[in-house]
Amino acid sequence: MTSKLQRVERPLPQAAVMAADIAGEYGPFADNERIHGVTFDGRQVWAATGDTLIAIDPASGEVRRTIDAPSDAGTAFDGTHLYQIAESRIDRIDPSSGKVVSSIPAPQSGSNSGLTWAEGSLWVGQYRDRRILQIDPATGQVLRSIASDRFVTGVTWVNDELWHGTWENDESELRQVDPVSGEVLMRLEMPQGIGVSGLEHNGADLFFCGGGGSGKVRAVRYPQR
């Protein structure tokens, strides 16, 4: 008597789903109609508004300073310099002087959206291509790609957790994904009509989220587990 073992397809575990807990919001800001990328330098939140980077005091919500810079997408901070997507390039900016120190080519196609710094690399969200790219900050060379099943906006790391924003059909989420497979591990659902453009974690208990055409930056609490 012979028998054949049949392969049983086991469903992937469902991602945990929670409502995003919005702790506060900043803006809108005078003369700045949109917020694209956001980053945090340990003291202030930097927001890309299209033509200007603004530095926001997270305690008061006041704009501390501005830097004139093309800034139509993601923003990052490596501990010393700001990085800013400016159409077909990524500029490295000295925040003390506002001067561009160097530039690298941005990844081609895919509608570059989010940007963050982690482990010596830049990570670029690509909206239209629904993926996250790890790139060499010195050359712009793509080191690896992580696929998503949603449009990708902002990108950030929380220790060893990779998170990204989504914005599709007037619905937005913050998603924790497996940094190897892209599997969705947790979803924080934003209220209907509130979008997420940029995304950054503050190293403690908050995400900062760019609000696109609302002109606002929102603080969302990191989920306690």
Image (cartoon, rainbow, N blue to C red):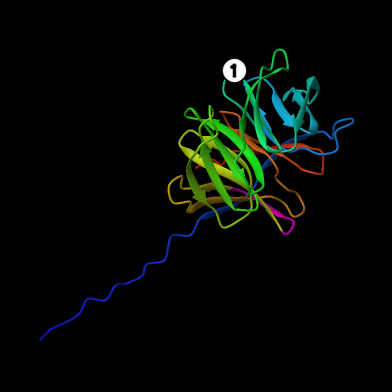
- In the image, residue 151 above or below residue 117: below
Decide whether residue 170 is among the magenta residues.
yes
Q: Residue at x 43, y 62 (%)?
A: 12
Which is more toward the observer, 70 or 149?
Answer: 70
Whether residue 27 is in magenta: the answer is no
The structure residue drawn at horizontal position 55% and vertical position 54%, both measured from the top left corner, is 148
Q: Secondary structure at mark 1?
A: loop
Extreme-left residue of the structure: 1
Magenta region's main secondary structure? strand
In the rendering, at what x and y percent does residue 69 appear? 76, 26
Q: Residue at x 74, y 22 (%)?
A: 57
Q: Position of residue 144 (x, y in %)?
A: 47, 43
Which residue appears farthest toward the top when viewing the image?
97
Question: Which residue is denoted by mark 1 in the rendering?
Answer: 80
Which residue occupies the foreground of this view, 122 or 150?
Answer: 122
Residue stretch in magenta = 169-174
Residue 23 occupies which quadrant of the picture?
Answer: top right
> Which residue is located at x 68 percent, y 50 percent?
190
**In the rendered structure, which amino acid carries the disc numbered 1?**
Thr
The quadrant of the picture occupied by the N terminus is: bottom left
